[in-house]
Image (cartoon, rainbow, N blue to C red):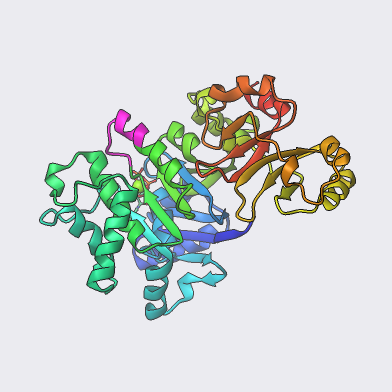
Amino acid sequence: MQSKISVRNLSMIFGDKKEVKEAIALVNEGKSSIEIREKTKATVALNDVSFDIYDSELFVIVGLSGSGKSTLIRCLDLLNKPTLGDVVIDDVTINKLSTKELREFRRNKISMVFQSFGLLSHRNVLKNVEYGLEVRNVDKVERRKKALDYIKVVGLDGWEEMKPSQLSGGMKQRVGLARALTSEPEILLMDEPYGALDPLIRREMQNELLSLEDYINKTIVFITHDMNEAFKLGDRIALMKDGKVVQIGTPQEFFDNPANDYVKDFIADVDKSKILKARSIMRKPDYVAKDDMLRTDLKDALEAKEMSFCYVVDKDNYLKGFVLLEDIKKSRASSIEGLIKENEIKVFRNDVLNDVWHHFDNADYYVAVVDTKNKLRGVISNDDIIAALK
Ligand SMILES: Nc1ncnc2c1ncn2[C@@H]1O[C@H](COP(=O)(O)OP(=O)(O)OP(=O)(O)O)[C@@H](O)[C@H]1O
Ligand SMILES: [Mg+2]
């Protein structure tokens, strides 16, 4: 996996100059934030944190109030300038950039969606969404076009003329999201975006975010203090406590190997079967064929890998079906085109395992996992699913 964001020995300390200086020495000695606060009165909101966020993943930071989540996400676009350590994005150490370089970096790479929506009350939906581009000096025609495009993406077409006061919480959040998307950032930062929404709307927004993700290829960093939300959304999750990351991993890894009792307590209320999704247990297939392959080449490849079957995709990774080695051996055709069979069972990557596991009883082979656009994202075997739900 390619690292998109690398957080290296990051510390953020709040206090007066003397306190911070004392606290830095104690952070370097490996002292806890609580000890340091007692000794120096400084708040160590982040205490020597290091981890990587991969390209295109939905990464969730979860933890109780005050654990340092917002401080951390604000360091990722340098709204907070870290006291110690580095934030490296696409191999650029962003805390070392000049003001001008940083402005350019923010313009192209990164957008933030806030919990409080941050909408301008006197502007209608369209103008609020356009605002993101206005501050970037994008010309009027392009601004309007992009704003209308993304209003559609978030499902608000028809509401362009409404003022924020006429919108529900969920709709306001969609406006904030559309505004963040207009600049087409590679990285989307979302600080408790659904915190102010009631549970029903919240669930709807979570599902929308998951399917939106199939259309916009972005690295998303999402903050929540709700463990169920974290597990529902996250490809990987970082659990924070007192400015430290206690554990980082996939939902499955949290359930299989909770790092300590704190983590165990934290996940105790999570209903695994309702939350684990296909994407959290799928694996990369050992081998995938391209639909324009020569039959003999595929025969050689499958025999070398001792596989009796494989999935077939086109050049853009859209799933075409599967082929069986026995059919390939029987055929005399030069291409594999006529040998591709359509999948009977297909699972979407955001399907909850509990809703789809019954399919696996009838599956002769491992099952293909696709996104809503039918791109092949991974595979799951019957054994995988049994192990995950046990
Ligand atoms: N600008 C600041 N000045 C002083 N202390 C701060 C500042 N920002 C954050 N803190 C402190 O840093 C710690 C972590 O705060 P942070 O806002 O990152 O927590 P959080 O995990 O986002 O909490 P919440 O779930 O309530 O949003 C807290 O003790 C907070 O009081
Ligand atoms: Mg916060």
Position in image of residue 52 (x %, y %): 58, 55
* Magenta stretch: includes residue 154: no
The number of callouts visible is 0
Q: Quadrant of residue 78?
A: bottom left
Residue nearer the viewer, 381 or 195: 381
Residue 49 vertical position relative to residue 98 in the rendered view, above or below: above
Q: Residue at x 48, y 47 (%)?
A: 214
Position in image of residue 28 (x %, y %): 56, 61
Q: Is residue 101 left or right of residue 125?
A: right
Q: Which residues are magenta?
A: 194-204
Residue 142 in sight: yes
Residue 68 in sight: no
Q: Is residue 199 left or right of residue 253?
A: left
Position in image of residue 264 (x %, y %): 56, 29
Residue nearer the viewer, 150 or 329: 329
Q: Residue at x 53, y 28 (%)?
A: 352
Q: Quadrant of the C terminus?
A: top right
Residue nearer the viewer, 184 or 298: 298
Q: Quadrant of the N terminus?
A: bottom right
* Magenta stretch: includes residue 201: yes
Q: Quadrant of residue 249?
A: top right
Q: Residue at x 42, y 72 (%)?
A: 105
Position in image of residue 183 (x %, y %): 35, 64
Q: Is residue 276 left or right of residue 365?
A: left
Residue 205 vertical position relative to residue 68 in the rendered view, above or below: above
Q: Residue at x 57, y 70 (%)?
A: 91
In the image, farthest residue toward the left: 122
Residue nearer the viewer, 354 or 220: 354
In the image, farthest residue toward the front: 332
